[in-house]
DNA sequence: ATTATTTCGGATAAATTTATCCTATTTAGA
DNA sequence: TCTAAATAGGATAAATTTATCCGAAATAAT
């Protein structure tokens, strides 16, 4: 469904949000450990998210990653997925036709469109705050 | 969503079904042309589907691929997807945790489970006959 | 029998995704 | 100012997926 990069990106963002909530900046090392991801690869993904202004980074000693408290609730899962995997998940044809076109549908178009749209709604209606709070309360987990 | 191999496999199966419906066996060459897929790669995928007994093959001159008429309506999209991409699409965690476990859910588990289940239902309730007839009637297309 | 056609299957190559390594740059604090 | 800690970014490697090539085996028709 999502690429590995996207999975790591989502989990990392949640972990950063969780800590930014408490005013703590977190390092790449800590993130990779807590979401159980390869450090250097995670670094690349975070770099991209920083470029896309989804998270902030601070270089140097005592640096790390953070998300402005007031932004946490406004960052949707869809933004992270879009940033990393692009938007083919919303518009692409399920059978790989060049374009998904209502007037030239593939054999699974009607059924697929429904699922794809629900996925879109799901990604657009889930934000970092909700997910971070679930981790905090122990209702959900980032690894194992 | 699906791998390229799976996309080709689905389209090829539909094209074979469509022709088997009319009593025509089709060659790899014809299939690859009609679904716009790389021939040798498609051959590998069809070989696998034959091994899984989803389609039949006949070697030699005038050989090709076919599906017994009476089987067409009973072959579900889910069988093809399972054969090629496995079943992680039904059971795997959306964020890549080792297992998707109700008692140890990832941050998107609740939302993801719903989508995943709808996808499963969709794949299980769509069969080759329906899709082949849509192609035949011009209601859907296999390429471009 | 011979030939042409076609799938099968192994080896290999190309492309993409995932992952690692190393150096440069930035920054806080001693 | 120097040092340690941290991200940035380029180069490279490993793994996986996608794709190609070629010879073997099977089969129908001549
Ligand atoms: S054309 Fe294939 S999903 Fe719309
Ligand atoms: S645990 Fe992640 S989808 Fe169920």
Image (spheres, coloured by chain):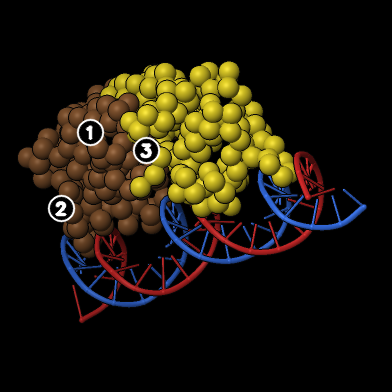
Chain colours: A yellow, B brown, C red, D blue
Give residue A130's position: percent from left, percent from top.
42, 23
In whole angstroms, how far apart are the C-alphas of marks 3 and 2?
40 Å
The numbered mark 2 sits on a residue in which chain? B
Q: CA distance from mark 2 to mark 1?
A: 21 Å
The answer to whether residue A69 shows anywhere in this view is yes
Q: Which chain's residue wears label 3? A: A
Q: Are marks 3 and 2 in contact (CB under 8 Å)?
A: no
- Checking the image for residue B55, the label placed there is none
- Where residue A141 is drawn, which disc sits there? 3
Point 21% across, 39% down: residue: B78
Task: Look at discs 3 and 2 and give the one toward the viewer.
Answer: 3
Q: Would the CB of label 1 be found within 8 Å of ligand 2?
A: no
Chain letter of the residue beneath label 1 in the structure image:
B
Judging depth in this view, the residue of C9 and B113 nearest the camera is B113
Pointer 2: what residue? B53
From the viewer's perspective, is residue B5 above or below residue A50?
Answer: below
Q: Is residue B138 visible?
A: no
Marks 3 and 2 belong to one chain = no
Q: Secondary structure at mark 2?
A: loop
Q: Position of residue B136 (x, y in %)?
A: 24, 28
Up the image or down, A40 lies above or below A50; here it is below
Q: Nearer the viewer, mark 3 or mark 1?
A: 3
Residue D5 horizontal side relative to residue B33, left or right: right
Return the mark for residue B120: 1
| Label 2 crowd bin: few (<14), some (14–19), many (20+), radius 10 Å | few
């Amino acid at each position: 469904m999502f690429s590995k990069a996207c999975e790591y990106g989502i989990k990392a963002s949640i972990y950063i949000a969780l800590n930014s909530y408490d005013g703590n900046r977190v390092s790449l090392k800590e993130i990779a450990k807590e979401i159980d991801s390869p450090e250097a690869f995670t670094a690349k993904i975070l770099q991209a998210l920083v470029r896309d202004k989804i998270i902030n980074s601070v270089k140097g000693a005592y640096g790390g990653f953070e998300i402005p408290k007031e932004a946490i609730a406004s960052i949707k899962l869809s933004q992270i997925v879009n940033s990393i995997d692009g938007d083919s998940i919303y518009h692409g044809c399920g059978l790989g036709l060049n374009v998904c076109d209502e007037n030239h549908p593939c054999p699974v178009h009607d059924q697929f469109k429904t699922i794809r749209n629900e996925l879109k709604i799901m990604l657009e209606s889930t934000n970092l705050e909700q997910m971070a709070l679930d981790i905090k309360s122990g209702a959900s987990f980032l690894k194992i």
